[in-house]
Amino acid sequence: ASGEGLEASLSTDCLSQQSVWSAISNSKLHLATITQGGKSLCLQIDSSNPSKVVTNSCICTNGDPNCLQDTRSQWFELVGTNTL
């Protein structure tokens, strides 16, 4: 992750903290990384271009039952596959 609101991209730098993604929230559908400044950023579908994935502040990931924001733009599920 390069920063908030920026497009997510693949990197060959597997040792960077920004290259580590974890499933967070109770649903485990939010994929987040930690920036150099210590802020959590989640993958999110860009509202103006649904074929683009960006990183933004994570929405309602703390389990607050009163959170009324729609979190679906940040739902991602990794599916394991075995190809040769």
Image: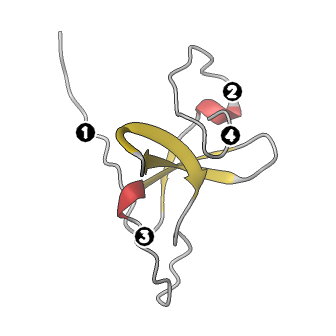
Q: Hey, what amino acid is under mark 2?
A: Ser
- Residue at image coords 53%, 66%: 59
Q: Hey, what amino acid is under mark 4?
A: Gly
The residue labelled by disc 1 is: 79
Q: Nearer the viewer, mark 4 or mark 1?
A: 4
Q: Hey, what amino acid is under mark 1?
A: Val
Residue sitting nearer the eye, 26 or 10: 10
The residue labelled by disc 2 is: 16
| Disc number for residue 3 | 4
Report, in whole angstroms, how far the alpha carbon at label 4 lies from the one at label 1: 25 Å
Residue 30 image point, x, y percent:
44, 56
Q: Hey, what amino acid is under mark 3?
A: Asn
- Residue at image coords 46%, 76%: 69
Q: Earlier in the sequence, mark 3 or mark 4?
A: 4
Report, in whole angstroms, how far the alpha carbon at label 1 lies from the one at label 2: 23 Å
Secondary structure found at label 4: loop
Q: Label 2 neighbourhood size at 10 Å, few (<14), some (14-19), many (20+)?
A: few
- Residue at image coords 67%, 33%: 2
Secondary structure found at label 3: loop
Q: Earlier in the sequence, mark 4 or mark 1?
A: 4
Residue 51 horizontal side relative to residue 55, left or right: left
